[in-house]
Image (spheres, rainbow, N blue to C red):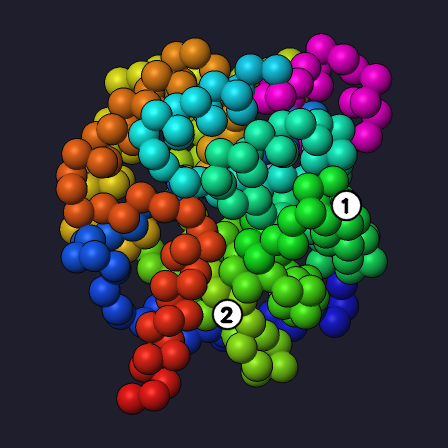
Amino acid sequence: MADLDLSPRPLNLADPAPEYPWPDGNKSALFVGFDVDAETAWLGNNLSHVERLVTVSHGGYEARVGVPKLLELLASLEIQATFFIPGWTVAAYPQMGEAILRGGHEIGHHGYLHKLPDPGKLDEAIEEIDKGLDALKSVLGVEPVGYRAPSGENFAALLHYLHQRGITYSSSWRDDIRPYRHRLSDGSAGPVEIPVNYAFDDWTFGLSSRVSPRALFGREPVLDLWKDELAGTHAWGGVTTMVLHPQVSGRPMRWHLLQEFLIHAGEQGDIWITNGQKIARHFEAHEALAAKG
Ligand SMILES: [Zn+2]
């Protein structure tokens, strides 16, 4: 730890987020993103949970109920979402992955066993990326362009590696309300970042378990929080990025809550409700336009 550089400086090297319009006259964007962890949410940072079958059964809910019900909901509202899926989950539940693809949704990278990317363990982080890419390719034929960090952590060398492996956008950072372009530690351009809104991480208020007990929040507080966050971000022309988990938002009450929220967002009439890949491509198109002058 002696060589940590603690000198005062902006720790994110990226330039400020550029201003450009959203497509079709929309005033903001809603990025509908799911993290389909299944059991890996419980295994990644504690491998011995593999034998604790009730603990991991929170994750088992996703393939059995959560994802099918969410796919129904998205189809009924004609919304295309992004599903970030760890490689282990894709290999364990290939039919679930195929159903997501059939629904017209994007599949993104979310590690292999959902291990927290640790700056002190670059080899392990690279293995998670490589095995995740292999699983997505061999099981589903998918070469993902989006990456969301398992357990929400990342570091400079990993960002560099993701860029080398064809990841064109990341959705993990918390430091903006508009997409921006990462700058890698060598000064070159990195992936586009579509920053997340942590108010839309359903895990923090919607899941309580023996190993991570938490207060649960019901329909009214969550719906109020989501509508207010959406309205505020909309007023500032940003992107509202959701971090939903089918083991939470695929449960009956939260599924209905999500349905109500998505219908509300659609009723605004000027919110681009879409997936990460489309937001990243739109960013790149405007970046290219700006570069031409
Ligand atoms: Zn996750």
* Residue at left offset 47%, top offset 15%: 251
Q: Is the residue under label 2 in contact with that under label 1 (CB below 8 Å)? A: no
x, y percent for residue 144: 61, 53
* Front in this rendered view, residue 70 or 7: 70
Q: Amino acid at mark 1?
A: Ser
- Residue 62 in magenta stretch: yes
* Residue at left offset 76%, top offset 13%: 53
Q: How would you classify the magenta stretch by its main secondary structure?
A: helix
Q: Is residue 42 above or below residue 106?
A: above
* Front in this rendered view, residue 97 or 176: 97
First of labels 1, 2 by sequence position: 1
* Residue at left offset 25%, top offset 59%: 23
Residue at which label 2 appears: 182
Q: Amino acid at mark 2?
A: His
x, y percent for residue 106: 51, 45
SS for callout 1: helix
- Numbered mark located on residue 138 in the image: 1
Q: Is residue 92 above or below residue 220?
A: below
Residues in magenta, as a range: 40-63
